[in-house]
Amino acid sequence: MTTNQALNFDKYAQEGNLFMHELGEMLNHPGEQDRAQAGRLLRAVLHTLREHISVGQSLNLIAQFPMFLKAIYVDQWKLSADRERIKTMEEFTGEVENKQREEGEVNFDWNEPTSTLVEKVLISLGKYVSAGELSDVEAELPGEIRRFLQERVGGE
């Protein structure tokens, strides 16, 4: 498909800002100061997820994302056929927390457990990702994590 329209980066920024505002509200961190914290969490969840699904599945997932989420997802991505295998939700949330620290998170003043924050981030992505695609992502994850997503986030 070809188009004669110029890339509208202002539109991407506007969509991204609206999404971050909505995510901040969902996380009970609605202020401008909280946007960076919500952004670190979003990046940490996406980067943790991509490390535990195949490259092909990642490409299928980001095909449904708007441009601003695609950029976050692929930022600093080093493709590898080998994936670390985690088995528990505790390991998954531990990786999310480590990635937040790597991004400069120091406050961790969330009033909810990391698993609930992960749930909220993934639910917020539901406006872009079909239930079928979410189900395909879930199928590549270990049982405990898959069940968590099926029960708390959705999918098929």
Image (cartoon, rainbow, N blue to C red):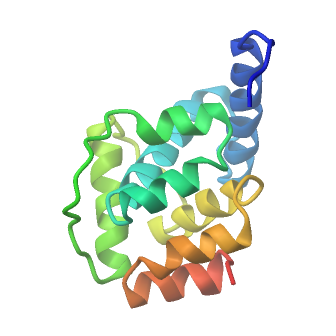
Quarter of the image for residue 130 reads: bottom right
- Asked if residue 73 is positioned above or below residue 82 in the image, the reply reads above
Viewer-closest of 27 and 99: 99
Q: Residue at x 20, y 67 (%)?
A: 84
Q: Position of residue 145 (x, y in %)?
A: 43, 81
The N terminus: image quadrant: top right
Q: Is residue 99 left or right of residue 111?
A: left
At horizontal 67% and vertical 78% (from top left) the residue drawn is 155
Query: Is residue 94 rendered to the left or right of residue 11?
Result: left
Q: Position of residue 140 (x, y in %)?
A: 42, 77
Q: Position of residue 73 (x, y in %)?
A: 47, 42
Q: Is residue 113 above or below residue 144?
A: above
Q: Quadrant of the C terminus?
A: bottom right
Q: Which of 90/48 is in front?
A: 48
Give 88 or 106, whichever is nearer the viewer.
88
Quarter where residue 53 is shown: bottom left
Provide residue 147's location: percent of width, then percent of height. 52, 89
Q: Answer left or right for 26 relative to 60.
A: right
Please state the total of marks drawn on the protein image.
0
Q: Is residue 2 left or right of residue 106?
A: right
Taking the spot 23% from the left edge, 65% from the top edge, the residue there is 83
Extreme residue toward the front, this view: 1
